[in-house]
Image (cartoon, grey):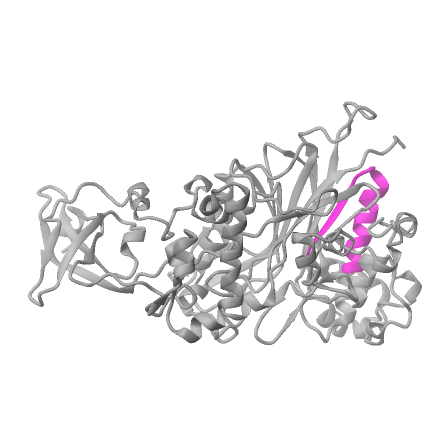
Amino acid sequence: MLVIWLNSEVHPLTGYRIQSDRKVAVCSVHPSELATLQCLGCVKAKIPVAKSYHCSPKCFSDAWQHHRVLHDRAASAVNENGNEEEELFGRYNSSGSGVLNTSLSGSASSASLTNGSTPLYPAAVTQRSGETWFEVGRSKIYTPSADDIGHVLKFECVVVDAETKLPVGHPNTLLTSRVIPAPSPTPRRLIPVSGLDAMVPLDPDGRISSSGTFTVLSYNILSDVYATSETYSYCPSWALSWPYRRQNLLREIVGYRADIVCLQEGNLYNFSLAFRYKVIIMRNFFAPELDKHGYQALYKRKTIEVYNGNSLTIDGCATFFRRDRFSHVKKYEVEFNKAAQSLTDALVPSAQRKTALNRLVKDNVALIVVLEAKFNNQGADNPGKRQLLCIANTHINVHQDLKDVKLWQVLTLLKGLEKIAASADIPMLVCGDFNSVPGSAPHSLLAMGKVDPLHPDLVVDPLGILRPHNKLTHQLPLDKRKACLLFLGWWDLGKVSAYSSFARVGVGLGSDQQKRRMDATTNEPLFTNCTRDFIGALDYIFYTADSLMVESLLELLDEESLRKDTALPSPEWSSDHIALLAEFRCKSRPRR
């Protein structure tokens, strides 16, 4: 046996598609169900055929409000440039993004896939059962094509003698369920909030930003360790698996083509344990994949490892930036655990320190990065001046009963940023999942620079770490536009974060729709997190308004379109959060 193994090799997988199995259409809303009806309006509008199928009249009726948007956009695209299919679906179907095309827009996509060399065996094999299987590939990895949709696949692996090239023993086979099309959510577009109000599609050549502007993406991508069927029972298990989600997330992130990408809950490392924990293999997905698209990565891992049964997963914050747009200057790491230790040593009596640390030590982190722009943002008034930019990326504690800890973590981060601001004249961005709704104490501190001493969140402070309340302030100009807003009559709107810019744009096709997706009382999105049990805004992009201005924002999603899959995550969107993206321009300022 040992000799045979050493002189043999595992032949690449052979993939077959059942030939006698009639190809069927699958539902665009419930891809695990067969289609029973087709929308002829989609066919007439030349919308990709996969979008036109539904499994029942009720399915079509329930999805109509979302489905009719496809018709409206197709008609709009025809009126504008007559190239509706490329305009509407080109970003997700384009092979130019480096992502494999698995859409139903045409069967020719299979030609671009590499699934092995010319078959060594006959192209078709008929078994005793009368089934005829057609060989579709011969390689260790097979990527299903549009031609495979609706069919069952069979994978066959045989051991081949390395010298004679003859099979050894019987082949091992694996049957799949029917192949379903890859979900293709309607692309989100940039909406200008400065100047002309019109939707802007993402440029096909990979460049969103106009000259002198840059884009920032903030996205909690839902760590694999938290994406369990117990928590998200409404999401199909195949759509919840990490191999599927990571590819879907990568496609989405790459499609936004942001200059700076701030991810939270990124699986920075995944350790596979074997041989009684003596062999540890480190794997990393996003860094090498985004490197192919020109991004450099910086990480800050959490200070705790989560064991999920057979592996250790470490998530944290990751910041990526385009190497052709920025260069790395400096990196600061914020470990709230270390800050908690210093705080308790200084303020808490010895007998109470263990209790205090149990409350404060929650393993959350922040990553602060200083970058230098490689493009000119200054204009003629400051020729040759270096354009630096400071980006903070954080994930604040999630527990709702630890309001004091949330506020203390945000205050700690802001005090660290104040030190950087004191040493350099530099625009700042504070991005992340703050696990704090608009109007909460952490949100008030970030947006208004202070917390009202009578704020109800301050009632929860068993360690006294928030007293005196007048220390709950910061000097960063994250909301320093009162004079301008008063002059324009906008002060009552309350300028708080990048997305609050939707509250002040003029009426138009894009802005009017986005205003309906904003909370009129807080001027923040109605939600950035949408699960079956919770919906609300938790994620923000704050910026120093004296040095940066918002040019455009990625459109928000509407709740109705997400509820067709119950909630997030779903087959279309692989996180329980939505991505936020803003385009900024640096303001010209006189030298200090």
| Residue 151 rendering spot, x and y as whole percentages | 25, 61
Which of the pair 425/92 is nearer the observer? 92
Q: How many marks?
A: 0
Give the residue furthest to the left. 128
The image quarter containing residue 22 is bottom left
Residue at image location 15% in from the left, 46% down from the top: 7
Residue 278 magenta: no
Q: On the picture, is 137 further left or further right than 62?
A: left
Residue at image location 89% in from the left, 47% down from the top: 484
| Residue 381 rendering spot, x and y as whole percentages | 83, 25
| Residue 408 rendering spot, x and y as whole percentages | 79, 63
Examine the residues drawn in magenta and state their main secondary structure.
helix
- In this rendering, the answer to whether 206 lies above or below 233 is above
| Quadrant for the N terminus in the image | bottom left
Q: On the picture, is 330 further left or further right than 37?
A: right
In magenta, the rendered stretch is: 410-432
The image quarter containing residue 585 is top right
Residue 421 magenta: yes
* Residue 511 seen in the current view: yes
Q: On the picture, is 344 further left or further right than 267?
A: right
* Residue 226 seen in the current view: no
Which of the pair 166/474 is nearer the observer? 474
| Residue 278 rendering spot, x and y as whole percentages | 42, 58
- In this rendering, the answer to whether 152 lies above or below 508 is below
Which of the pair 291/91 is nearer the observer? 91
- In this rendering, the answer to whether 240 lies above or below 88 is below
| Quadrant for the C terminus in the image | top right
Residue at image location 16% in from the left, 44% down from the top: 119
Q: On the picture, is 499 further left or further right than 12?
A: right
